[in-house]
Image (cartoon, rainbow, N blue to C red):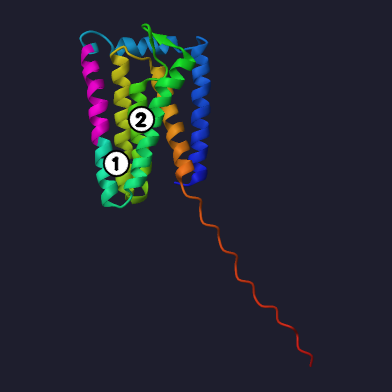
């Protein structure tokens, strides 16, 4: 992926995260949407089931995805790249928990909730590993891993809402923040395109006198 495209995605995503966080911090939330989705997903005994789903989709699956990516990266000789991008994913989680949440100050059942750390961890890992492995994946592999990452993120979002840990807006903020931080890191890490060498100039021929 080009540095310009990554930069645009990063700027748009981070700006959208900031605007959504500002709206949430001032009490402007899609309360009716949140209430309807929570009521649909978070009813006993489904609440406890969603808690178990969220726990499983978190640390265990994240660890499996990162380890598999590191193994593939070592096999394809891009281990350093994969490790750096894993760091970008971790940075998104740290920013979510220690910067974004305190700055927004939104509370859900007494806990800081915007954005969701669970969804950020999953989405940031999925995006980071996909971009890291992008150069060595074929067309079909890229599509399959993209669908897996999107499904993983959506399922974790449903789980934290169903467990009544977060609202849908928390999950949207997490996805935007993850995209912004990871693509910003990728844009910085991406090597600059090599300059196009100038076309060789034709030697000037002096006209001979007849």
- For marks 1 and 2, give the CA distance: 16 Å
Q: Residue at x 45, y 32 (%)?
A: 181
* In-front residue for pair 43/113: 113
Residue found at the far top of this picture: 110
Residue found at the far right of this picture: 209
| Residue 177, quarter of the rendered image | top left
> Label for residue 77?
none
Q: Residue at x 36, y 15 (%)?
A: 166
Residue found at the far bottom of this picture: 210
Residue 191 lies, in percent from the top left, at: 47, 49
The correct choice, above or below, for 138 with respect to 93 in the image is below
Marks 1 and 2, the one that precedes in the sequence: 2
* In-front residue for pair 40/193: 193
> Would residue 165 be found to the left or right of residue 201 on screen?
left
Question: Callout 1: helix, strand or loop?
Answer: helix
The residue labelled by disc 1 is: 144
The residue labelled by disc 2 is: 123
Disc 1 crowd rating (10 Å Cα; few below 14, some 14-19, many 20+) is: few
Q: Residue at x 46, y 46 (%)?
A: 190
Instruction: Give the overall secondary structure of the magenta segment.
Output: helix
- Span colored in magenta: 48-64
| Residue 101, quarter of the rendered image | top left
Q: Residue at x 49, y 18 (%)?
A: 21
């Amino acid at each position: 992926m080009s540095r310009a495209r990554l930069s645009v995605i990063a700027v748009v995503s981070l700006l959208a995260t900031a605007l959504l966080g500002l709206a949430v911090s001032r009490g402007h939330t899609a309360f009716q949407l949140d209430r309807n989705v929570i009521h649909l997903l978070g009813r006993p005994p489904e609440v406890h089931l969603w808690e178990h789903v969220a726990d499983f989709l978190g640390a265990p699956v994240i660890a499996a995805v990162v380890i598999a990516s590191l193994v593939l990266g070592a096999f394809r000789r891009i281990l350093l790249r994969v490790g750096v991008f894993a760091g970008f994913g971790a940075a998104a989680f740290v920013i979510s928990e220690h910067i974004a949440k305190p700055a927004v100050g939104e509370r859900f059942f007494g806990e800081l909730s915007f954005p969701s750390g669970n969804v950020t961890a999953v989405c940031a890992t999925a995006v980071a590993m996909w971009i890291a492995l992008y150069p060595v994946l074929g067309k079909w592999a890229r599509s399959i891993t993209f669908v897996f990452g999107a499904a993983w993120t959506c399922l974790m979002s449903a789980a934290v809402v169903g467990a009544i840990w977060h609202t849908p807006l928390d999950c949207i903020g997490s996805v935007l923040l993850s995209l912004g931080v990871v693509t910003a890191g990728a844009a910085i890490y991406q090597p600059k395109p090599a300059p196009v060498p100038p076309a060789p100039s034709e030697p000037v021929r002096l006209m001979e006198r007849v």
